[in-house]
Image (cartoon, coloured by chain):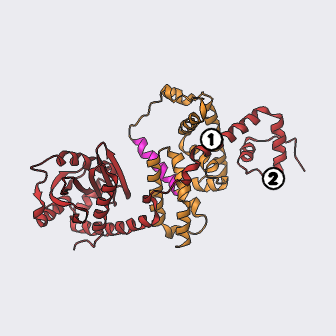
Chain colours: A orange, B red
Amino acid sequence: MSSFRSGVEAAIPALRRYARALTRDAEIADDLVQDTLVRALRSEHLFHGGEVRSWLYTILTNLNRNRLRSIARRPLIKLISDDDAPDMAGPEAGARDIERALASLVEEQRAVLLLVVLEGLTYREVAEVQGVPVGTVMSRLARARAQIRAFLDGERPALRRIK
Amino acid sequence: MIDRDLRVTEDELHAYVDGELPAHRRAAVEAWLATHPDDMARVTAWRSLADSIRARYGTVASEPVPPRLSLRQMERARRWRRGLAAAAVIAAFVAGGLGGWAARGAASRPTAATFAADALDAYKLYVVEVRHPVEVPGSEKAHLVQWLSKRVGYQLRIPDLEPVGLTLVGGRLLPGPHGAAAFFMYESKSGERFTLYSTRANGPDTALRYDADGPVAALYWADGTIAYVVSGEANRDRLHKVAESVYAQLDLPAGR
């Protein structure tokens, strides 16, 4: 097996983890991973060394952005009800809170937070994945953390307005 | 030298939490936190957020990887798709002027998912039909393939699904989202029915996708020019086996 292929293979579990957190839907997440792998195998000749893993995160992040754009074109509206208010009891409730808190972020911020916190990428690597300067990564990370803190404190100003 | 008196920026607090703070700033940040409870609370909250995210999603990486994400299976699929692409190019020459017509509507062309929904509707409509499920019976296979190829504008191939226990019942012409669609029905000895739907597409290439609608389901893929949908009862394994057989046969050299 080529080192490229074994690098891709080794990254699959981590890609699934990132995609699951990014989409919060197991089926959609694995679809994304599948499309990422298909694209990676097809464009192996475009890969000029470096970290295979970062390159795969880049493909997946871009595919997810395209996916969200195509969803946004459709008039799909998810209403936020009072059931979505964060509940503060028990660790399972905590897991649901995390899903909803992640859902409250805009895509770029969610990706930065997850790449740093869950996938352990450095700020520089995240900057490469997103194709932006490190400063932009920092401000996205700061906004993501502030937004989630506000969300978990039950403020959720932006979401309240939608309802 | 420890610069204890310098103001600590928010970026440094993040870097501290994420292990990216340069070593020489560590003592300064820790001293700052000891005297700034608001910032300390933020740092604590960020850390507990990171713990929660890892607790919620960390285990996904140790789940077994599903077969459809295995590289071996995927490379096999890629070989099929390469064959499909070659077939599509040849079909475009055969179709002649139709190629230009197809390119015109490219921007608004529906995605493979739309085709899958259309195909499922057709499946539900005709699968219950006992006397007239098809327009041309499977016994007139040569005529069927010639007629439908002419109408959809590319060379069709009717897969032989006997190896998976399915006999060709026949086919019919359907209105597709853009022009005609070909629809073939297969049946097993026990009466289960599967259909193959094919029409022109111009979306991005799509890997094999599964879509269920109550008791019926579809596996579909698109190869840029042509979309294929295999529909049947919602039994994913069985459907997958049938679709794989279709997939493999479409890989044969075109025009033969």
Q: Looking at the figure, which quarter contains the C terminus of chain B?
A: bottom left
Relative to B143, is B36 above or below? above
Question: In this image, B174 relative to A99: left or right?
Answer: left
Asked if marks 1 and 2 fall on the same chain, the answer is: yes
Q: CA distance from mark 1 to mark 2?
A: 27 Å
Q: Quadrant of residue B162?
A: bottom left
**Whole-percent x and y of residue A35?**
44, 57
**Whole-percent x and y of residue B70?**
46, 62
Tell me, for residue B23, which label it has, or none. 2
Relative to B183, is A50 above or below? below
Q: Quadrant of residue B229?
A: bottom left
Question: In this image, A123 relative to B76: left or right?
Answer: right
Comparing B78 with A108, the one in front is B78
Tell me, for residue B52, which label it has, or none. 1
**Whole-percent x and y of residue A94?**
59, 35
Mark in the foreground, 1 or 2:
1
> Residue drawn 85% across and 42% down?
B6
Q: Residues within 10 Å of mark 2 (few under 14, many from 20)?
A: few
- Where disc 2 sits, the SS reads helix
> Residue drawn 50% across and 43% down?
A24
> Going by the picture, which residue comes out furthest to the right?
B1
What's the residue type where badge 1 is placed?
Ser
Comparing A70 with B76, the one in front is B76
Residues in magenta, as a range = A59-73
